[in-house]
Image: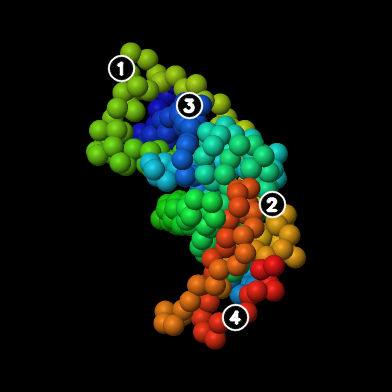
Amino acid sequence: MEYKSTSVHLASYIREMFCEYIYTEYEIIRFQGDVELDESLFGRKIKYNRGKPTGNRIWIFGMIERSSNKIVMYPVDSRGADVLITLIQKHVEPGSRIFSDSWGAYSGLNRLGYEQFTVIHKTSFKQLYINTETNEEVQCCTNRIEGAWKIAKDHFRRINGTNSNLFEQHLCEIVWRNHVHRAGNIYSSFFDLMKNVYTLEMPPRFTYTKPLFRTWTPPSKADEARHNITIVQGSDAESDGEEASTVETSEPTCSSLPASSENSEHVQGPSKACSSGRNVTCTKKTSKPILDLTEYLK
């Protein structure tokens, strides 16, 4: 194997090590406890309907464990339940609490042994659930995974986008940095990884395959010729596809109404079953004048 010595090629060799790490780590990593789920669209953003949407656009599905802040990210061709539920079952232990938006693909998680709590981002960013049997309060939000999207997109902004055939390598770098940055010294973690791959006796032997993620189909060469650059958009507006949700709009949705910082009161409605299948009461915060929610919550 012949190695080139330019900085671009050296960076590519380094990212190959990250791909090898992800290939091995994704086979064993399992989350438990509180886990947040979300999807985000990576691609060029068109503001104010000006210009044409050039570049490839890629959906990324992500999971983050709250206790460790470790993330798992997958590029996906489809956000359907057949794809997302399979990935959730692979990485999340049954019995875990799952916090997500109301995307319809997540609607069957309760039947699979998970406790799912949802928040509808069109009306609120946080939702409070109360178990009427134990008085336990559970606050549902997806702030952690949203923060992970910002870190990932900032990475692509710093390098002004990347070719589609290098997208997997950069995604692996993002996940690797997340996994090791709490180890104390990222440099020692890097050299520990390098000495397991590169030796003085022979060229490195990588076991990962291409494409690394079997959940997506990389753009063809013809697509790459037309759209050579993938630039990350700055907003997740299109990723919050609540309109495709299976949540019934006729039923009361557990969303929070706007509340002022002063003179706010809690309006507690009758008990009902939440998305986790338990008997809960939705607590809503309203600004004065207090809205009459009696009929609304029946």
The foreground one among 138 and 66 is 138
The label shown at residue 28 is: 3
Amino acid type for the residue under numbered disc 3:
Ile
Query: What residue is at 50 percent from the left and 21 percent from the top?
Result: 207
Query: What residue is at 53 percent from the left and 61 percent from the top?
Result: 127
| Residues at marks 2 and 4 touching, judged by CB atoms closer than 8 Å | no
- Report whether 294 appears left or right of 98: right
Residue 204 falls in which quadrant of the image? top left
The answer to which of marks 2 and 3 sits earlier in the sequence is 3
Report x, y in % for residue 43.
58, 56
Residue 214 falls in which quadrant of the image? top right
Query: What residue is at 63 percent from the left and 75 percent from the top?
Result: 293
Q: Which residue is mark 1?
A: 200
The label shown at residue 291 is: 4
Query: What residue is at 25 percent from the left and 39 percent from the top?
Result: 184
Amino acid type for the residue under numbered disc 2:
Gly
Q: Which residue is mark 2?
A: 104
Above or below residue 110? Residue 159 is: below
Q: Residues within 10 Å of mark 4 (few under 14, many from 20)?
A: few
Q: Residues within 10 Å of mark 1 (few under 14, many from 20)?
A: few
